Amino acid sequence: MTGDAAIEAIDVARTYALDGVSVSALRGVSLTIAHGEHVAVVGPSGSGKSTLMHLLGGLDQPTSGRLRIGGRDVAGLTPAEMAHLRNATIGFVFQSFHLLSRTSALDNVALPLVYRGQGARERRERAALMLERVGLSHRIGHKPNQLSGGEQQRVAIARALVTEPAVLLADEPTGNLDQATGAAVLELLEQLNTAEGVAVVLVTHDREVAERARRQITMRDGRIVDDSAAADGAGTGPVTGDASGEVPR
Amino acid sequence: MRLAEAWRVALDALRANRLRSGLTMLGMVIGVGAVVILVALGTGTKNEVQAQVEGLGSNLLLVVPGQVSLNAAPAVSRLDQSDLDAVIRVAGDRDRVAVSLTSGENVRAGKEQVFTSLLGVLETTPKVFLRDVRAGAYLTRTDVETGRRVAVLGSSVARTLFGERDPVGQQVTIAGVRFRVIGVFAPLGQSLGVDRDNEVHIPLSTAQRLLATKRVDAFAVKAPDAETIDRLGRDIVAELQRRHPDEEFSAVTQEQILGVLGDILGVLTAVLAAIAGISLLVGGVGVSNIMLVSVRERTREIGLRMALGARPRDIGLQFLLEAVLLTTIGGLLGIAFGVGASLATAALSPVPAALTWWSIALAFGVSCAVGIVFGVVPAQRAGRLDPVVALRTD
Ligand SMILES: Nc1ncnc2c1ncn2[C@@H]1O[C@H](COP(=O)(O)OP(=O)(O)O)[C@@H](O)[C@H]1O
Ligand SMILES: [Mg+2]
């Protein structure tokens, strides 16, 4: 099972040094995200959810423990290698969208492909396809400030998926959206999970939202205090044939 | 990331902040423009001086009493006719030797009057120096040997005294003595700050009588070729030294004069270029400053790009290219401004300005270099950002 996991963390800790005082954001977390899984992460504010997402996404290195992303141990990887790993394996969706404001929806979606060295035409074609996939074909040339919050987050989702990542990490993606719009965005994520087989890890405050995921992880004080997968038997969810764990070098 | 893509991103970023980019470029425009203009002025002046010195004639040797120095007053001459004969003997040919006895005098014709340099000379002058007679003829050997009261006028003297009339055959009064005009020089212009058209040549013997002196002031000797010129100079100085053991003489070639003047102008140009270089430095610091501000403002964008797969060097390159674009666009505008100002100066004023390809290429190269040098620190700072911290910045 281990070789097939999209992300695998073993006893991972992350400590921040703040003015000489060390703050433990994560205190030994072990978890495996299988391909195609749908996972919700819940827990009170400050429990380490975002820190965990940063580590799972390869944006940060653990202080201790082992972390494998796409089959690759991140220990000792240079920032450039980490960047490559993220581009190949992970799609991020942020609470605050993080779209480039002077850039069209199409070029925002195409941005990750720039760092793959893809040509402009190929990028645009793929980005247009992704925008169609999230139902925004009619907004291709719009700038973020010409889009509603829900539309902006859908652009961000299209951007996260344009690289065909193994895992999509969404840290409170509906935090800046109203109830109805948020629900639509979550539905889109669920749909993509089922249809495209991309694993989705979703941080949320909303119990109801969490319940819709097949697996729930509850965090408190930098620890996982409950993991429904442990109860149901590990490695739930479909495993896609495309084990895109291998990082093209 | 592809390089073409990186250029496009950098250009977009500059466009997004047009006013700021423009103001930052202004420093480069001024610096590069100043370098181009000052180098053009320096080169133009040097070319002009060279043309003037070469315009005197070729293979010339100037022999004067005392030292040749730009900051010492010319020594009073104790040379006379016998020294002239000695120099002609060493030179081997009277036609190779010119001599002058110079005095400032008023020249009158009718009601018109002009203060000029009066030169007592030999008939050999046009054979040694490049001097054309426009009307009439130059002095003859007979004029010199018999001490005739005949004069050849410089073109501006002729114009002041006679206007459009032909001066040849007319009378002029020099220091109260009447002379007959036998010729007028073609215009020559300025040479080393002297108006060479404001001269009157009369026979040496006549001048010595008029000024009640036996002396001559200086010799000019035309060497047969460039190879023999140095030895000829030494021989003449040695002969004069032998005849006047307690005095000093010097012989300088045009090349030596050019060398000295070239050195002075070279230093002057370098100093001016260095001053202009300081404004380039200030422009570069401005670019560095703006790039640091830009990195800070766009920290979130940097974090996002990193999250999406930008490597530190991709981010660094993006900001470095932005700095290089700022300085090279500024540099190109500065070159355009400098070239325009130099051409206008050369066309509209008597100040010489000569553009050289190397100075334009250098200015462009320096613009790129300034962008790289002053962009590298902000670029590194951007590339080293921690993506998690950068994403959280607001
Ligand atoms: N860069 C940091 N420096 C210091 N402490 C941090 C940093 N990031 C997070 N923390 C701390 O780590 C803990 C977990 O934070 P976080 O992962 O953001 O929690 P959550 O996303 O669950 O609200 C908090 O106590 C937070 O203050
Ligand atoms: Mg959080």
Image: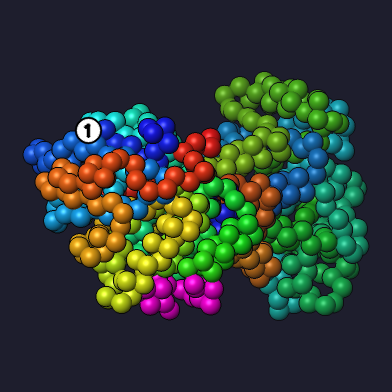
Nearer to the camera, B366 or B208: B366
Local secondary structure at mark 1? strand
**Quadrant assignment, res A151:** bottom left
What residue is pinned by disc 1?
A11
Position of A147 with respect to B260 (left or right) is left
- Magenta residues, start to end: A135-152
**Residue A23: percent from left, percent from top:** 12, 41
The location of residue B172, given as percent across then percent down, is 77, 68
Q: Is residue B53 left or right of residue B18?
A: right
Image position of B230 with respect to A157: above or below: above
Q: To which quarter of the image does residue B189 belong?
A: bottom right
> Residue drawn 54% across and 69% down?
A132
Tally the marks. Answer: 1
Q: Residues within 10 Å of mark 1 (few under 14, many from 20)?
A: some
Display coloring: rainbow
B382 relative to A110, above or below? above
Q: What residue do we see at 48% from left, 46% from top?
A: A240
A144 part of magenta stretch: yes
